[in-house]
Image (spheres, grey):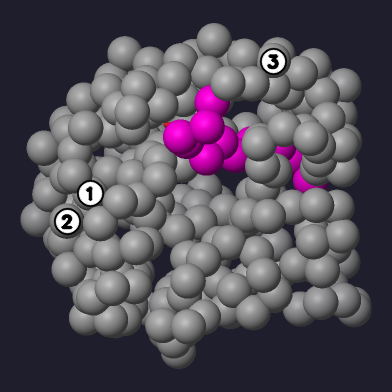
């Protein structure tokens, strides 16, 4: 089944409004001719509105890095799905390992957010992945399956149409250590098998599974050439316009 590549930049807590606009302007200019790849930029919350304005009229999409599952109310410091929709956001990263480890987010909590995103027309990019210790103890498949099943609990085929998964081995995030294409493909294909158990085969085969973990222009071709790798969630390299755009161009060339 054909799955269009998605290259998403997770800027994390980097770039305020001014810097976000400048970086997006450079990316927008260079990405003008890109058609075969979906390109998503996920700046910090405060820059979402400006990012949406500076991308309008282009094919660039804007995503958030997190959200809360209630639409409004007494939840100090949180941002809801309706607020994200209101400023033009189409995607939201959920369950990133930094949210899990630094902010204590559980699979159960992430599940509520994934459900709320899907119900409210936002595409969730659900992040799953094992830690270094879990890999060393041969627990990778067990951990990834448990995260996937718990975070997707109660979601039907119909609801899951806009679901995106990101496999992000925690030991590869921000460390410069990348999973080899073979290691990444092995886990991606396992994830797809599990999606077939959760949803029907047609839906499971249409879900994009992104790889994340020190992806950069130098390793993107080998990773994106794997059959079950449908794009990348890029952290550090997405802050450098040339690196990020080069990854998109590699994906575009592989698609043609
Ligand atoms: C991420 O945080 O989603 C990520 C993949 O980061 P990096 O590319 O820097 O490893």
> What is the C-alpha distance between the residues marked 2 and 3?
35 Å
Disc 2 versus disc 3: nearer the observer: 3
Q: Quadrant of the N terminus?
A: bottom left
Q: Are marks 2 and 1 in contact (CB under 8 Å)?
A: yes
* Residue 189 tag number: 2
Q: Residue at (28%, 33%) from the top-left corner?
A: 224
Q: Nearer the viewer, residue 114 or 121?
A: 121
* Residue 228 tag number: 1
In this rendering, the answer to whether 59 lies above or below 76 is above
Q: Quadrant of the C terminus?
A: top left
> What is the C-alpha distance between the residues marked 2 and 1?
6 Å
Q: Residues within 10 Å of mark 3 (few under 14, many from 20)?
A: few
In this rendering, the answer to whether 169 lies above or below 17 is below
**Image check: 49 left or right of 188?**
right
Q: Which residue is mark 3?
A: 29
User: Which comes sooner in the sequence, label 1 or label 3?
Assistant: 3
Identify the secondary structure beneath mark 1.
loop
Query: Can you see residue 211?
Result: yes
Q: Residue at (66%, 35%) from the top-left corner?
A: 60
Q: In this picture, which residue range is highlighted in magenta? A: 34-45
Q: Residue at (87%, 21%) from the top-left corner?
A: 18
> In which quadrant of the rendered view does residue 75 lie?
bottom right
């Amino acid at each position: 089944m054909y799955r269009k590549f998605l290259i998403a930049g997770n800027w994390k807590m980097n770039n305020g409004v001014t810097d976000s606009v400048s970086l997006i302007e450079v990316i927008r200019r260079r990405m003008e001719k890109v058609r075969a790849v979906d390109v998503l930029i996920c700046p910090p919350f405060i820059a979402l509105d400006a990012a949406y304005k500076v991308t309008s009229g282009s094919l660039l999409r804007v995503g958030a890095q997190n959200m809360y599952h209630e639409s409004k109310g007494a939840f100090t410091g949180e941002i809801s799905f309706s607020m994200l929709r209101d400023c033009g956001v189409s995607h939201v990263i959920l369950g990133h390992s930094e949210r899990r480890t630094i902010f204590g987010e559980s699979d159960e909590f992430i599940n509520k957010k994934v459900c709320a995103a899907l119900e409210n027309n936002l595409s969730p990019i659900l992040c799953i992945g094992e830690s270094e210790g879990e890999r060393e103890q041969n627990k990778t498949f067990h951990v990834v399956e448990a995260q996937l099943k718990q975070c997707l609990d109660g979601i039907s085929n119909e609801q899951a149409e806009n679901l995106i998964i990101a496999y992000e081995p925690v030991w590869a995030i921000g460390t410069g250590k990348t999973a080899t294409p073979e290691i990444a493909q092995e886990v991606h294909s396992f994830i797809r098998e599990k999606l077939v158990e959760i949803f029907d085969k047609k839906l499971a085969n249409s879900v994009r599974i992104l790889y994340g973990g020190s992806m950069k222009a130098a390793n993107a071709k080998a990773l994106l050439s794997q059959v079950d790798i449908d794009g990348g969630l890029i952290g550090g390299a997405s802050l450098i316009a040339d690196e990020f755009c080069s990854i998109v161009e590699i994906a575009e060339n592989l698609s043609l």
